[in-house]
Amino acid sequence: MAFRKLAALFAVCAALGAAMVIGHTPAKATVDSEALVRVDTGWVRGQVSAHDVAFSGIPYAAPPVGERRWTPPAPPRPWRGVRDATVPASPCAQDPTGAGPPVMVVGDEDCLYLNVTVPREAPPGARLPVLLWVHGGGFVNGTATDYRRLAAAADVVVVTVNYRLGPLGFLSTPVLDRDGQPSGNYGLQDQTAALRWVRRNAARFGGDPHNVTLFGQSSGARSVCAHLAAPASRGLFHKAIMQSGPCANALVTKPVADERGARATAQLGCASSGGIAGRGAARPGDVARCLRGRPLADVLATLPDQGGGFLGEYRDAAWMPVVGTPVLPAQPLDALARGAATGIPLLMGTNREEMRPFVGFAYDAVGNPMTEPEYRALIGQAFGPDAAAVLARYPVPRYPSPAVALSTVLTDWGGTVGACPMLRTARVAAQHTRVFAYELAEDSGRVDNGFPLGAHHNWDLPFLWDLPTGGWYPELTTEAQRALSRQLIAYWTAFARTGDPNAPGSVPWSQLAGDAPVQSLAAGDGGIAPVPFAENHHCDFWRRR
């Protein structure tokens, strides 16, 4: 480095006062509140806490606004001086109510930022495993900023990423298609851009760019599934973890997504020249300009879910990655069957009562108890000619209430999310790579209006992250649960290091093979043990449906 550049660097550090400079190796904690890192687009200043160093709101792509709305992510612009990375960036624009118009807009279109957390103390010269977390939220909600704990707990580098959501991330229509870049997968391409950023910059935070684990929960796990099938993501990560998001649940295809896009375009008043100018059929370029000019609130209000709510299948939801384009050529399960995960160890699982909140908060948990006739009618609606067989396998007297019975049916079937699609995913993938499968069986202890939520969807998150309490995220209330949290963190981070969750002091976890049991994860003595998952969830019954 030339003397002039060295002098400039020293001047920056002096101007900021005493600060930790994290270069190619993480420095030990020698300061009170600041840390500096040079990423490929400029210097960033993070914040030192008691246990970790957090860098928030680092741009990994250019703002997707104005003419860049509904275009693939572009590289971020470099900046001069030192960028403040102590405050999280805005979430990607979303309507957290999900109720349609009028919408409550939260976040911003200028949202392609990520956060990096590193342990405050790390061995000099370490190359730590890197874990890139993709948040859930049904591809319509969520943020990268709520997730923190893993880095300090297990000497790893953790990256969390915002990506475009809802229609801004997944609108598919021929008027937005470009040469070699069909529309519909902007949110997925954002995530790939973040993986590329990690490849370029991980070492600057003490991470190993050749040991990256991509992991996520719910729609974040579906994203991981998509990246296993996405050619542009190949080689950017080396291990994968999918929590409560089975690859066996099909994603929407390009023709169907384009039909939905046509309806959204009409809702926005851009389908004909009447919403633009003049008369006659609108030209594609005019429609695209019309769409890009529509107010954010109007865009977020388009196209509610297409399916039957919790009785529908996952691909019925309005917004998700689109299959049948160069970005995502095949359904993730088909890609796994052809060996897409060869050489990429996988850890995947589900929660024992995934569907309890979806049913409970439509009925019992909000003071509207489901009756047995309603249960029977809903089974008929969901399963048609198979309803009699389903009712015989899941009779109401076997369960505490009709709502619990329906939750059990939907969890086992897993059309939206649940048990048997996870097992099907694991068995298909295990033909080509190492797979470790689990079921989180620890009861949350949460009961609403007499309705027990059990080990519900999202209950896995507090075991890995420090999250806002309340809502979906009850606290870990017992020492046994906190011990289980430490064990899960040990499993997840051992897997990130070696591709195998087993480590000294952990209860052994067997690789999935054939009809091998799935690892049950629950607190207390004997809570971690293999269980006959397929039998418990009637997966042979559902395989024939």
Image (cartoon, rainbow, N blue to C red):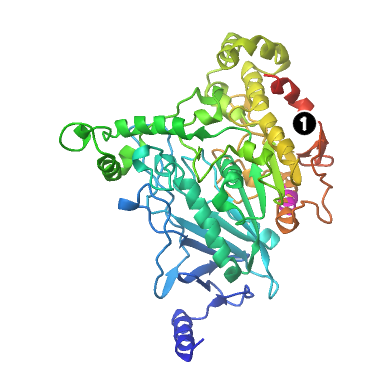
Please tell me whether the stretch drawn in magenta is mainly helix, strand or loop.
helix
Segment colored magenta? 485-491
Relative depth, front residue between 380 and 52: 380
Q: How many marks?
A: 1
Q: Is residue 314 left or right of residue 262?
A: right
Which residue sits furthest bottom?
3
Q: Is residue 102 above or below residue 400?
A: below
The percent coordinates of residue 340 (x first, y second) are 65, 45
The percent coordinates of residue 363 (x first, y second) are 54, 21
Residue 440 visible to an observer of this rendering: no
Disc 1 designates what residue? 533
Relative depth, front residue between 358 and 474: 358
The percent coordinates of residue 54 (x first, y second) are 55, 64
Q: Is residue 54 above or below residue 349?
A: below
Q: Is residue 194 above or below residue 445?
A: below
Q: Is residue 31 above or below residue 530?
A: below
Which residue sits furthest front?
179
* Residue at 61%, 40% in the rendered image: 474
The quadrant the C terminus occupies is top right
* Residue at 57%, 58% in the rendered image: 159
Relative depth, front residue between 316 and 418: 316
Q: Residues within 10 Å of mark 1 (few under 14, many from 20)?
A: many
The percent coordinates of residue 24 (x first, y second) are 60, 74
Magenta span includes 223: no
* Residue at 66%, 70% in the rendered image: 121
Identify the image quadrant of residue 379: top right
Residue 233 visible to an observer of this rendering: yes
Which residue sits furthest left?
278
- Amino acid type at mark 1: Phe
User: Regarding mark 1 in the picture, which secondary structure is present there?
Assistant: helix
Q: Is residue 300 left or right of residue 247?
A: left
